[in-house]
Amino acid sequence: MRWMILALALAGCATMDTAPAPQAARLSNEVLTLVLSDGTVCRANWAAAGGAGRFDDCGPGFGYSVSVVENPNILRQLFTGLTEALGAEGAVPPMAEVVITDPMGRDTVFVSPPPVEE
């Protein structure tokens, strides 16, 4: 009988829903894209919001803050200048730190563009 109670308790724990967690964040010049652990994709116009806001209609309601690197390294500046000179303005996403805050107040920090894995 004890094993049956233990099995039911474990089965109950296994079926508990967990809130989706942030897995990745990417920036374009205007849009922040957040990917959650359950596969949900959330988007917000971070530039129009002034760099901070909320994904109210996505997941449990995540907040976000985008801090753009104003003075990136010289190679990045040259590459960005070259693409703009060639007429591809906005093709290079900004370098930034993206902080996603869950409803419990926990922060998850991403950098965009993400680092290259070697």
Image (spheres, rainbow, N blue to C red):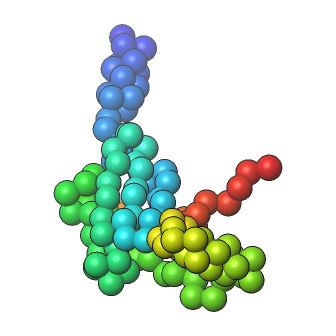
Name the residue: 27% across, 52% down. Answer: 59
Figure check: 83 above or below 68: above
Q: Write down the quadrant of residue 16 in the picture.
A: top left
Vertical order, 24 against 109 (above or below): above
Q: Residue at x 32, y 54 (%)?
A: 42
Tally the numbered discs.
Answer: 0
76 on left or right of 57: right
108 in relation to 14, above or below: below
Give the camera-side residue of 109 and 75: 75
Could you say where residue 104 lies in the image, as x and y percent from the top left? Answer: 34, 65
Q: Position of residue 97 (x, y in %)?
A: 54, 74
Residue placed at 42% from the left, 14% from the top?
3
Looking at the picture, does residue 76 appear above or below residue 112?
A: below
Percent x, y for residue 55? 27, 63
Q: Nearer the viewer, residue 29 or 22?
A: 29
Q: Quadrant of the N terminus?
A: top left
Q: Position of residue 52 (x, y in %)?
A: 34, 79
Q: Residue furthest front?
A: 86
Which residue is nearer to you in this view: 105 or 80? 80
Q: From where the camera sits, is residue 103 visible?
A: no
Q: Which residue is most to the left? A: 57
Residue 104 versus residue 100: which sits nearer the camera? 100
Most extreme residue toward the bottom is: 71
User: Picture quarter containing residue 40?
Assistant: top left
At horizontal 58% and vertical 71% (from top left) the residue drawn is 86
Can residue 90 be seen?
yes
Residue 107 located left or right of residue 46: right
